[in-house]
Image: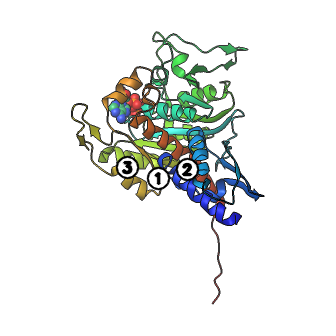
Amino acid sequence: MTQRIRQCVESLIQQSLKPYLDIPLVTSDVIKHIHLIDGHLDIAIEFNFPANDIKQSLEETVKQGLAERSDITTLNIVVNWTVPTFPRLTQIPALQQVKNIVAVASGKGGVGKSTTAANLALALAQEGAQVGVLDADIYGPSQGMMLGVAEDARPETIDDKYFKPLIAHNIQVMSMAFLVTDKTPMVWRGPMVSGALQQLLQQTLWQSLDYLIIDMPPGTGDIQLTLAQKVPVTAAVMVTTPQDIALLDVCKGIEMFHKVKVPVAGVVENMAMHVCSQCGHEEPIFGEGGGAQLADEYHVPLLGSLPLDLKIRQQTDSGKPTVLAEPDGQIAERYRVMARNMAVQLDKITESMSSGPTISIADD
Ligand SMILES: Nc1ncnc2c1ncn2[C@@H]1O[C@H](COP(=O)(O)OP(=O)(O)OP(=O)(O)O)[C@@H](O)[C@H]1O
């Protein structure tokens, strides 16, 4: 009997997850226990990604789905989530207060990497995770501005050695831009960049982070390679626009991360479709399907596809990214689905890393 109820709960979970997630989950893995004793059904479900939104709707869906069953008189369902520290292939020591580091990178500049990183961080935080952002884009640090940090805000120093990250919209933020002023411009050279960023990463007092999102400098040169080699990154997310040239550059990015044993969690296609603010007409002005094709070629999922929309620019550039400015809108939902896809994918890629090759011997 419990077996039949279990199957029913599994399909209710599938049904409930559909609007929230594109990447399929093995539902049997998330059911921690399911017991039916004397008509009382006890169910415990646990996700390994932040799932506050899912939690509420899933509890409702399961309760409604089982309401008609005569063999269940009372039902207790608990849906929880905890983000674990996912394994890495590299031997770089982990940061004590940071469970997982996700590098948001792009093959070339101006594709919307920082916008994606800011909305990704906010979407994860909205789902309940503890999130930090490190702006490593030293050539055009924009996270402070995008996350609405006051221009003159400076991190507090502790013992002349550590920085307390600034807090913006419930996110811990650190950027080289907080430490220099317009009057002290810096001429960055490769070794300086990676040295300074490593220091910034290690000397910031991050507090119990589930995810630290690093907004990487654009491109795939020596600086990016050194960063990827020296920072304990769990996975990378590649942001691209659908033009051929941007896609070509993103291939180089994926290959770079492969070279330094950092798995790529997926690709985000930005400015995929232009939606006319006057008539709503949709036009793929930078081409169509490029992100999906690329994801297919490199066997990485397409985590999300965002439109080219004036509102995204206006909201993000004024310090209140779309996920915050219009949380109930379609675009914010796209960002949240992208964030959940990424979070689920961290488990999938690290699982496939640890499984290794298997040998099977067939019977004749
Ligand atoms: N989907 C979008 N629709 C409209 N405008 C966007 C979109 N994504 C990003 N933008 C805007 O495009 C500009 C560049 O975006 P962003 O700074 O995120 O790009 P980037 O790839 O990080 O650039 P850089 O190479 O300078 O680091 C910003 O003004 C941003 O608001």
Residue 232: percent from left, percent from top: 63, 40
Task: Please determine whether, in this image, residue 193 is positioned above or below residue 159.
Answer: below
Q: Which mark is residue 301?
A: 1
Q: CA distance from mark 2 to mark 1?
A: 8 Å
Residue of label 2: 345
Amino acid type assigned to the residue bearing label 2 in the image: Gln
For label 3, the residue is 291
Q: Which mark is residue 278?
A: none
CA neighbours of label 3 inside 10 A, class few (<14), some (14 to 19), many (20+): many
As drawn, 211 above or below 257: above
Q: Position of residue 183 (x, y in %)?
A: 46, 9
Q: Nearer the viewer, residue 51 or 12?
A: 12
Element carrying mark 2: helix
Which type of secondary structure does the marked residue at label 1 adopt?
loop
Determine whether label 2 and label 1 are within 8 Å by CB.
Answer: yes
Q: Is residue 261 visible?
A: no
Classify the position of the C terminus by image quarter.
Answer: bottom right
**Element at label 3:** helix
Q: Nearer the viewer, residue 21 or 19?
A: 19
Residue shown at the point (42%, 38%) measured from the top left: 219
Q: Name the residue rendered at 70%, 40% in the picture.
A: 93
Residue 360 in picture, x, y percent from top left: 64, 77
Report whether 360 appears left or right of 280.
right
**Quadrant of the snapshot with the N terminus:** bottom right
Alpha carbon distance from label 3 to label 1: 9 Å
Along the polypeptide, which appears first: circle 2 or circle 1?
1
Ligand 1 lies in quarter: top left
Mark closer to the chain start, 3 or 2: 3
